[in-house]
Image (tube, rainbow, N blue to C red):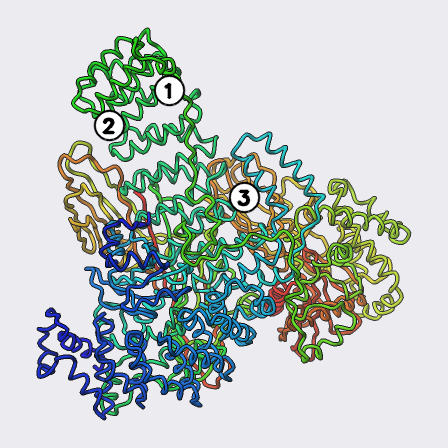
């Protein structure tokens, strides 16, 4: 699947300024295209060499090089692969070019394309790029092209701190925030008046301690700790309504605003539900192993404490059911579509935020439907039907029904489309996980503590 | 505000380079329109005295760089500001310098003195950043300065500066590789650094500069292993990858004995069975003779210390550990990585992509590992195609006889997908399943044949191709399908498919002698309307038929050839002419004619359908090279295991003074052991060959007081790794030893034991053989030890009898009556009777609980159908309140409800299993047939002994059965399916920790000795490893002896140990699987305060037990 352009590849020539390239490549394994050809000396250059940020229309709107400069033209290979893939999701994350490897991620409509010259674990790079995107998100509230362009200097400073010579240096948001303050309107006003700067001039204390994730000297007037237990149900429901596969994936996202150095321990009523857990580095692994208690000195601010999976062998209560009747008539240009969604095993809670999306077959021209509740849209270009249902009330089940218009003459679609369902249930963790208590040691004050539960549909698919 | 305009203005500035697209930016152009030539405005700003102006200018310059615009002409103006006081200006200047210094080397030298000054700054941040920039400036002239700076920084006080020095090493190396030797010295020095901050960076430098100098790692190996968990994530990845390579050069393959076996086993699975199994047997026999493999403790250390990292949030770390386990761990242990890898599948799609590639490779070698997670690889219509295809690959690799039907059902849904590439891949996958699993070959073929009528050309073509391949394997058996396909020629219009069918008929015309000429006849009729590829195959068919059946097809062939002769396509004309010459004998045709048959009807080898991921594992997993399936630049080969292990002592480190002091006492009576506390326990296995009997005896819980014994706390691990051949020899030794003991014992314990044995009814005989021996083993030893301490314990226990004495006799009476018939309880019951001969009986049996239990028993009695011995057994001594758990709720089970409880009796047939009594009631109004357990999904090492199938269960009826589960001393759930004739239910049994043990009986002295022994052993490790103490308050109703004992025994299956002191309660048990001792002491102080201490080698069990007991007492 990976494209491996050969030297004869037209793109290779476009990229490589033919004359110079030919003899250089004969001499050394990895020429650079910078004006100064010192690549001959570099024997082992590892990890991330350069980073390009590319938007959906193919503009390279930011580049950063940690070693010598790599020409933008290397991205041509990426564009070529992108064209071949048709869909953005299908661009292979790793592309091999004659002299470089491109490892890319796609986040929030931006491609982060990194240039690698030698062997490196691909996940290392992918994980790092996602961390970069997370940091942007954290700093600017969104990881969009505009946000990055508006804050290009901070972005550059961040990238400079996050990677040294292509090797990750500081990726913890608490440390970065001590080094480079996130932009706020207030701060930029103050800075312009006082002439102070966004860049910290002391070493982030966290960097040195054995708790590098927490910045020092945190002070709040209201000390608060919030935990959101968010569970997602991944499921595949087959035609007859029985569950092919279901499992619960959960995370605990925390927002901790506590002064000083609090040492927290969070315990569950039923920790054994957690089948597989991955931890934020702050969590003491041994305590968990032995006592099933999450004991940690938290980072300051928002972070993901754990993510977990509830074993797929446990029966998963599926909170909704879908009755569906989708049929396309042979030799006729229409079909029927009738879908009803109803609640099931919802433990007395309301199922809300219900949205159904369906990728209809290509032959579908248009859909003429009536919804008893909510509104639907059908995009005739992408063939996506979206039905925003809202809340489900058991008294009157939402139903969407009507006629499907097919392209005349086209063969009847082979397959009925799968229904993707989203929903939300507040105040409920579907696995039954319950936080027992949160204790704080090391500080005197009494914090305000809060736990919120929510269940959502993850990858919830109904085959029809 | 500060940043946002900068970006816009940069556009104005950069327009001077003659890039009109930015020139008309009105906002910025307006301000600097007066003189934006050659960045004069920026230069002016940089020259000004105001920091704010400088900052503004620098921000705009950086924005230009970010855009990829050339700002090199500003170099002189910028470099002047390198000494600026404002830290943000300074930082931006650094950014600029690093970017352009290479191009302006002379000017760059101007800045060097500033950095040199910075290197001496008292602030470590400034020192570090000076070094960072200095080393990033790629100017060859300053190499000596850099070298000096790095050397100095490597001995800096601040670990942060040392870390920066480590980062600088590869930079200098890439600038001037002649410095290698000096740099290696620095690396060597930094490798010895003890801070976690430095470790990751220096290993990274090592990997880049001198990955071949594996010798530098020796002395630091153990330190790196131990530090690993505290190193930052990125460093962990680098270290783990490096250690994988290291281990491959230093240790022996843990699977060396199995590798041969495994290969042949696999062969046997696919190929012709008999021959291979014979080979395998021969090999197994030869293996048994071979020296047993003993894992190097350092190897074990690495595996143990990396395992927790599987729970890292960082996918790269998880993958690194996974590949380490895959490449280094004994086969039995590799399974642990599956769960973590499956977890990663929830991550971003790029992560999924990489992980699936690796899983695909792993699943070929170690299919069993991912089998429990089969469903996690099911495909959703919303997955990107590249993910779908990888998942398909994994599913195909995982397919075997048992799960193939599920997989094929799943494939059936995929075939109807709208994503045609994916459908094509699915058809190929079906083909592969069909070739690998003979059982389903026909099903697959039929399915594929049906697909031939699919409307989609791609699907048909793909199916025909796959069918063709399948038929080539055994054409003789499938003439039916060939006939069927021949019929299809009437309907199928897809040229590719028609062509493939014709080829098939031609190739196997001998199997369908009647149909083939008829097909040719039809094709001859429609010849002129066919597509070119079809015409070519018609000619082929004609030729083949002419050769085999010239009588019927001679005329037809000539007709076809004549038609072809005048075809528009020259390929077809050529082919016709060529074939005519070849098959129709004429004077000119010459020698070739004779061989025509051989040419056309030669045996064509069947294509092999195998995974494209086969043998990819010669690349280190998780690497770029593995992903690309091609060697990437700079890839370090993963070396093969050595045949002989290199000297392990190279990793020994001088013992620092301070540790000697703390552990001196221990050392006196211990054999010299490596320094690292963690590895201490591990040194057991190294000496194991001779010390086996000793440790064995200890495991089985004897009161061996040696204390110096080498048995480690890692018994669990040890057992796993020893496996196979060694177990056999061990067993023999064990048996011999037991034999001896029994002889000894006969003098003392023998006569006493005779009586219970004889009472011990039929069941005793059922549970014969090994079990009896094992039961006798520890018991015999006990008798030995006890008699020696008889006096002491007798006197003590008489005093301790005060609190329990009142109830004791009656209890014993009652108990004996109940216990004796239930004599399935091997060790328990025998030692019990032993005890009451010379010590007052332990009062733990808790008669009070009979209120609960009897009622329950009567309940159960009514329900019991099968096992007559059930009822009395339920009253067995250690039986407190039985708690039943729900296995399957009536609703979920569609009327079938299942409950289970832990009967606390030894499971007949296997003493390592926990007996689980299962009660099934049929609340439906129909008969439930053939109830059974199937498809257990267990963690490595766990075993399950299913209950015999229940033929039928009438409506309203209840059945009770017993099954055994070996939980491997873990509280992990055992998952399996409960099947009826119609449905399958997924259920799981998770044992409370208290059920993982069986009571042992010991005297107070023995108890103390064991406790001390455990505590002593714990000291060598982290304190608290084998002792957990917790304070608690006893609630009102729990303040009587009786209540306490009852609660404790209800929480855990333990036996009470007599105790001299008032207000102290002792209990002892052994874990069922490994037989490690669990000792419980409860000290009741004034009022409600109490202290609970649990001693056990199994720390996890200990801590969980403490919690459970406290919970029980608090109720």
Chain containing mark 2: B
Q: Residues within 10 Å of mark 3 (few under 14, many from 20)?
A: many
Percent position (x, y) of residue B408?
A: 40, 37
- In the displayed structure image, the side of residue A340 where residue B697 appears, left or right: right
Residue at which label 1 appears:
B599
Question: As rendered, which of B589 and B1005 lies closer to the eye?
Answer: B589
User: Residue drawn 65% across and 64% down?
Assistant: B1047
User: Which quadrant would residue B633 be assigned to in this image?
Assistant: bottom left
User: Which quadrant would residue B659 be assigned to in this image?
Assistant: bottom right
Percent position (x, y) of residue A61?
A: 22, 67
Among numbered discs 2 and 3, the one appearing first in the sequence: 2
- The CA span between labels 1 and 3 is 70 Å
Chain containing mark 3: B
What's the mark number on residue B495?
Answer: 2
User: Residue drawn 17% across and 18% down?
Assistant: B566
Q: Residues within 10 Å of mark 1 (few under 14, many from 20)?
A: few
What's the mark number on residue B921?
Answer: 3
Among numbered discs 1 and 3, the one appearing first in the sequence: 1
Q: Residues within 10 Å of mark 2 (few under 14, many from 20)?
A: some
Question: As rendered, which of A317 and A88 lies closer to the eye?
Answer: A88
- On the same chain: label 1 and label 3? yes
User: Residue drawn 23% across and 51% down?
Assistant: A10
Q: Say whether residue B1067 is visible.
A: yes
Q: Which residue is the extreme one toward the right?
A: B747
- Front label number (2 vs 1): 1
Q: Secondary structure at mark 3?
A: strand
Among numbered discs 2 and 1, the one appearing first in the sequence: 2
Question: As rendered, which of A27 and B631 lies closer to the eye?
Answer: A27
Q: Secondary structure at mark 1?
A: helix
């Amino acid at each position: 699947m990976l494209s491996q352009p050969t030297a004869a590849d037209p793109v290779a020539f476009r990229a490589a300024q033919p004359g110079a390239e030919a003899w250089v490549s004969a001499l050394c394994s990895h020429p650079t295209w910078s004006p100064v050809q010192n690549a001959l000396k570099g024997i082992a250059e590892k990890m991330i060499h350069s980073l390009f940020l590319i938007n959906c229309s193919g503009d390279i709107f930011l580049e950063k090089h940690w070693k010598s400069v790599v020409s933008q033209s290397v991205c041509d290979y990426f564009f070529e692969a992108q064209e071949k893939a048709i869909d953005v999701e299908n661009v292979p994350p790793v592309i091999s070019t004659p002299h470089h490897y491109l490892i890319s991620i796609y986040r929030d409509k931006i491609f982060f394309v990194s240039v690698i010259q030698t062997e490196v674990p691909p996940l290392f790079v992918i994980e790092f790029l996602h961390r970069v995107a997370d940091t942007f998100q954290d700093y600017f509230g969104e990881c969009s092209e505009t946000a990055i362009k508006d804050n290009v200097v901070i972005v550059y400073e961040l990238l400079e701190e996050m990677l040294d010579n292509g090797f990750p240096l500081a990726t913890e948001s608490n440390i970065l925030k001590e080094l480079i303050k996130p932009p706020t309107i207030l701060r930029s006003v103050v800075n312009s008046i006082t002439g102070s700067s966004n860049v910290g001039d002391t070493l982030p204390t966290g960097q040195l301690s054995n708790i590098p994730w927490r910045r020092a000297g945190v002070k709040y007037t209201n000390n608060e700790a919030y935990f959101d237990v968010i569970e997602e149900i991944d499921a595949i429901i087959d035609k007859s309504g029985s569950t092919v596969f279901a499992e619960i994936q959960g995370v605990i996202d925390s927002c901790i605003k506590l002064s000083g150095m609090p040492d927290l321990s969070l315990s569950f009523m039923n920790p054994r539900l957690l089948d597989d857990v991955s931890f934020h580095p702050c969590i003491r692994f041994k305590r968990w192993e032995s006592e099933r208690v999450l004991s940690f000195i938290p980072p300051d601010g928002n972070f993901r404490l754990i993510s977990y999976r509830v074993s797929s062998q446990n029966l998963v209560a599926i909170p909704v059911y879908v009755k569906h009747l989708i049929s396309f008539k042979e030799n006729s240009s229409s079909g029927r579509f009738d879908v009803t969604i109803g609640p099931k095993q919802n433990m007395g809670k309301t199922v809300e935020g219900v949205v159904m999306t369906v990728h209809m077959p290509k032959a579908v021209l248009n859909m003429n439907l009536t919804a008893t509740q909510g509104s639907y849209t059908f995009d005739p270009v992408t063939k996506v039907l979206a039905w925003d249902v809202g809340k489900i009330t058991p008294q009157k089940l939402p139903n969407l029904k009507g006629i499907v218009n097919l392209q005349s003459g086209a063969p009847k679609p082979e397959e009925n489309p799968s229904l993707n369902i989203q929903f939300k249930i507040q105040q409920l963790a579907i696995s039954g996980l319950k936080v027992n208590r949160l204790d704080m040691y090391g500080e005197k004050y009494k914090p305000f503590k809060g736990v919120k539960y929510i269940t959502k549909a993850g990858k919830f698919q109904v085959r029809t | 505000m500060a940043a946002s305009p900068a970006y816009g203005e940069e556009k104005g500035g950069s327009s001077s380079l003659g890039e009109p697209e930015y020139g008309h930016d009105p906002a910025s152009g307006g301000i600097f329109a007066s003189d934006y030539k050659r960045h004069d405005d920026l230069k002016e700003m940089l020259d000004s005295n105001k920091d704010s102006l400088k900052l503004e200018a620098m921000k705009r310059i950086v924005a230009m760089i970010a855009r990829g615009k050339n700002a090199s002409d500003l170099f002189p103006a910028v470099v002047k500001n390198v000494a600026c006081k404002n830290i943000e200006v300074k930082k931006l200047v650094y950014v600029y310098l690093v970017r352009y210094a290479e191009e302006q080397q002379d000017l760059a030298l101007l800045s060097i003195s500033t950095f040199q000054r910075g290197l001496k700054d008292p602030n470590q941040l400034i020192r570090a950043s000076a070094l960072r920039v200095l080393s990033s400036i790629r100017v060859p002239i300053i190499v000596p300065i850099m070298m000096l700076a790095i050397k100095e920084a490597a001995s800096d006080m601040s670990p942060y500066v040392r870390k920066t020095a480590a980062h600088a090493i590869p930079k200098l190396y890439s600038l001037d590789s002649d410095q290698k030797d000096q740099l290696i010295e620095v690396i060597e020095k930094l490798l010895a650094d003890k801070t976690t901050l430095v470790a990751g960076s220096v290993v990274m430098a090592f990997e880049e500069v001198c990955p071949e100098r594996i010798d530098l790692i020796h002395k630091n190996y153990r330190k790196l292993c131990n530090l690993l968990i505290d190193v930052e994530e990125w460093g962990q990845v680098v270290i783990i990858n490096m250690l994988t390579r290291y281990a491959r050069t230093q240790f022996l393959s843990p699977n060396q004995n199995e590798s041969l076996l495994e290969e042949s086993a696999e062969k046997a699975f696919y190929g012709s069975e008999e021959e291979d199994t014979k080979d395998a047997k021969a090999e197994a026999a030869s293996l048994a003779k071979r020296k047993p493999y003993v894992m190097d403790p350092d190897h074990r250390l690495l595996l143990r210390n990396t395992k927790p990292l599987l729970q890292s949030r960082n996918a790269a770390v998880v993958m690194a550990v996974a590949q380490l386990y895959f490449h280094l761990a004994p086969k039995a242990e590799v399974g642990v990585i599956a769960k973590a890898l499956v977890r990663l599948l929830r991550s971003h799609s790029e992560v999924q992509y990489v992980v699936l590639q690796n899983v695909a490779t792993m699943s070929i070698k170690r299919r069993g590992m991912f089998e429990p997670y089969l469903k996690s690889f099911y495909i959703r219509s919303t997955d990107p195609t590249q993910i779908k295809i990888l998942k398909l690959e994994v599913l195909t690799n995982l397919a075997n006889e048992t799960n193939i039907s599920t997989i094929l059902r799943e494939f059936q849904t995929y075939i109807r997908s709208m994503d045609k590439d994916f459908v094509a891949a699915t058809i190929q996958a079906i083909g592969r399943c069909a070739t690998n699993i003979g059982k389903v070959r026909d099903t697959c073929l039929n399915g594929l044949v049906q697909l031939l009528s699919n409307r989609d050309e791609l699907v048909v073509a793909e199916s025909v191709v796959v069918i063709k391949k399948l038929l080539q394997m055994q054409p003789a058996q499938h003439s039916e399908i060939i006939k069927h396909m021949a019929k299809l020629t009437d309907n199928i219009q897809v040229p590719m498919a028609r062509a493939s069918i014709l080829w098939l008929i031609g190739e196997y015309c001998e199997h369908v002698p009647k149909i083939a000429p008829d097909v040719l006849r039809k094709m001859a009729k429609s010849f002129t309307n066919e597509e070119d590829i079809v015409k070519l195959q018609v000619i082929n068919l004609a030729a083949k038929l002419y050769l085999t059946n010239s009588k019927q097809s001679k005329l037809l062939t000539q007709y076809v050839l004549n038609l072809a002769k005048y075809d528009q396509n020259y390929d077809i004309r050529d082919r016709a002419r060529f074939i005519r010459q070849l098959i129709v004998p004429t004077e000119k045709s010459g020698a070739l004619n004779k061989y025509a048959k051989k040419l056309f009807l030669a045996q064509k080898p069947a294509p092999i359908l195998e995974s494209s991921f086969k043998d990819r594992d010669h690349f280190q997993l998780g690497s770029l090279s593995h992903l690309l399936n091609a060697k990437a630049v700079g890839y370090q080969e993963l070396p093969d295991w050595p045949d002989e292990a290199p000297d392990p002592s190279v990793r020994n480190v001088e013992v620092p003074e301070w540790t000697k002091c703390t552990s001196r006492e221990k050392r006196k009576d211990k054999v010299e052991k490596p320094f690292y506390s963690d590895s201490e326990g591990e040194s057991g296995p190294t000496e194991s060959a001779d010390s086996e009997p000793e440790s064995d005896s200890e495991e089985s819980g004897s009161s061996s007081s040696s204390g110096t014994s080498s048995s480690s706390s890692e018994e669990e691990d040890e057992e796993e790794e020893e496996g196979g051949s060694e177990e056999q020899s061990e067993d023999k030794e064990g048996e011999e030893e037991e034999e001896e003991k029994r002889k000894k014992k006969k003098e003392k314990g023998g006569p006493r034991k005779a009586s219970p044995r004889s009472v011990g009814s039929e069941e005793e005989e059922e549970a014969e053989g090994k079990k009896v021996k094992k039961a006798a083993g520890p018991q015999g030893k006990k008798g030995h030890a006890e008699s020696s301490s008889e006096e002491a314990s007798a006197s003590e226990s008489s005093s301790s009898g005060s609190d329990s004495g009142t109830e004791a006799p009656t209890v014993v009476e009652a108990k004996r009556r109940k216990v004796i018939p239930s004599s399935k309880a091997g060790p328990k019951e025998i030692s019990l009777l032993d005890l009451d001969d010379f010590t007052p009986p332990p009062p733990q049996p808790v008669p009070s609980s009979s209120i609960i239990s009897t009622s329950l028993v009567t309940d159960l009695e009514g329900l019991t159908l099968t096992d007559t011995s059930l009822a009395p057994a339920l009253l067995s001594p250690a039986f407190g309140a039985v708690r039943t758990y729900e296995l399957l709720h009536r609703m979920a089970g569609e009327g079938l409800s299942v409950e289970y409880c832990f009967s606390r009796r030894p499971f007949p047939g296997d003493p390592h299993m926990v007996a689980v009594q299962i009660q099934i009631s049929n609340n439906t109004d129909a008969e439930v047939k053939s109830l059974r357990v199937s498809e257990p999904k267990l963690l490595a090492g766990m075993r399950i002994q299913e209950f015999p199938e229940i033929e039928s269960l009438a409506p309203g009826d209840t059945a009770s059965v017993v099954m055994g589960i070996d939980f491997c001393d873990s509280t992990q759930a055992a998952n399996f399916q409960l099947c009826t004739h119609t449905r399958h239910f997924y259920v799981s049994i998770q044992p409370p920790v208290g059920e993982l043990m069986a009571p042992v009986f010991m005297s107070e002295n023995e108890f103390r000795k064991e406790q001390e022994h455990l505590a002593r052993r714990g000291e060598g490790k982290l304190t608290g490893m084998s002792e957990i103490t917790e304070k608690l308050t006893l609630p009102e109703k729990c303040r009587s002896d009786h209540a306490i004992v009852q609660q404790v025994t209800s929480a855990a299956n333990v036996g009470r140990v007599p105790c001299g002191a008032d207000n102290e309660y002792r209990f002892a048990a052994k874990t069922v699987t490994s037989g490690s001792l669990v000792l419980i002491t409860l000290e009741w102080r004034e009022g409600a305060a109490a202290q609970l201490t649990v001693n056990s080698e199994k720390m996890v069990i200990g801590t969980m037990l403490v919690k459970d007991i406290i919970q029980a007492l608090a109720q």
